[in-house]
């Protein structure tokens, strides 16, 4: 009788371990950064296809940054008229120099004529705060500061 109780308890522990959600430490590092092949970001969740082909869904509040095709994308607060908003956006980190970091954000602009309605916006952040939103006048000097070549399309 005692053997039957011990065997049933061991079986229940094994089934509970199988039923638990598996942790995948290879996909996230300590900074909540995910290496992925493809990502689709919704309002509250991100659908991620990992490099090993596995698909997963992750809440956006747990995702701080991700790497796709060797490019780093970090979650940054959007600023409007120089003031922070409650909106966040994943921006591509292009280059850092000291405390400054140059980011690119692709937005959809309905006023653009043509098939590709995406527009690149560039921002310089100092830490987590926006330092400068680049326009066509300030872009050449900012790119030279970061040691990047620039051109207009």
Image (spheres, rainbow, N blue to C red):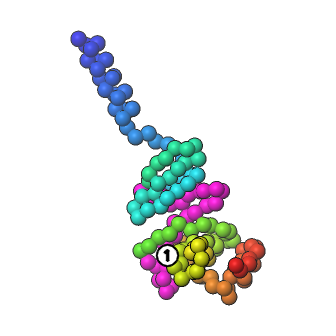
What percent of the width, then of the height, locates residue 108?
53, 74
Q: Is residue 126 visible?
A: no
The x, y position of residue 12, in whole percent, is 31, 26
Q: Is residue 107 magenta?
A: no
Q: Is residue 107 above or below residue 26?
A: below
126 vs 55, nearest the viewer: 55
Does 3 appear above or below 132? above
The magenta span reads 59-85
Q: Residues within 10 Å of mark 1 (few under 14, many from 20)?
A: some
Which residue in the protein does label 1 denote?
A: 78
Q: Quadrant of residue 86?
A: bottom left
Asked which quadrant contains residue 7, the reply is top left
Residue closest to the far front: 114
Magenta segment, prevailing SS (helix, strand or loop): strand
Q: Is residue 151 above or below residue 21?
A: below
- Nearest the viewer among 34 and 99 is 34
Q: Residue at x 37, y 37 (%)?
A: 20
Give the secondary structure at mark 1: strand
Tell me where residue 10 sits by quadrant. Answer: top left
Q: Which residue is painted at 61% across and 61% down in the image?
A: 72
> In which quadrant of the rendered image does the N terminus lie?
top left
Q: Position of residue 24 (x, y in %)?
A: 50, 43
Magenta span includes 77: yes
In the displayed structure, 72 sits above or below 147; it is above
Residue shown at 47%/61% (left/top)? 41
Would you say residue 64 is visible in this rendering? yes
Describe residue 105's horizontal placement relative to residue 97 as left or right.
left
User: For this rendering, which residue is in front, 74 or 6?
Assistant: 74
Q: How many marks?
A: 1
Q: In this image, 88 relative to 105: left or right?
A: left
């Amino acid at each position: 009788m005692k053997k039957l109780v011990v065997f049933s308890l061991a079986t229940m522990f094994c089934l509970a371990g199988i039923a638990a959600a598996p942790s995948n430490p290879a996909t996230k590092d300590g900074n909540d950064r995910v290496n992925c092949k493809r990502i689709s970001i919704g309002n509250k969740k991100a659908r991620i296809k990992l490099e090993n082909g596995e698909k997963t869904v992750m809440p956006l509040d747990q995702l701080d940054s991700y790497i796709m095709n060797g490019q780093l994308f970090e979650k940054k607060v959007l600023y409007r008229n120089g003031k922070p908003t409650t909106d966040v956006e994943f921006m591509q980190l292009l280059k850092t120099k000291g405390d400054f970091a140059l980011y690119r954000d692709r937005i959809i602009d309905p006023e653009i004529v043509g098939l590709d309605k995406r527009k690149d916006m560039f921002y310089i952040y100092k830490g987590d705060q926006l330092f400068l939103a680049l326009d066509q006048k300030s872009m050449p000097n900012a790119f030279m500061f970061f040691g990047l070549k620039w051109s207009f399309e």
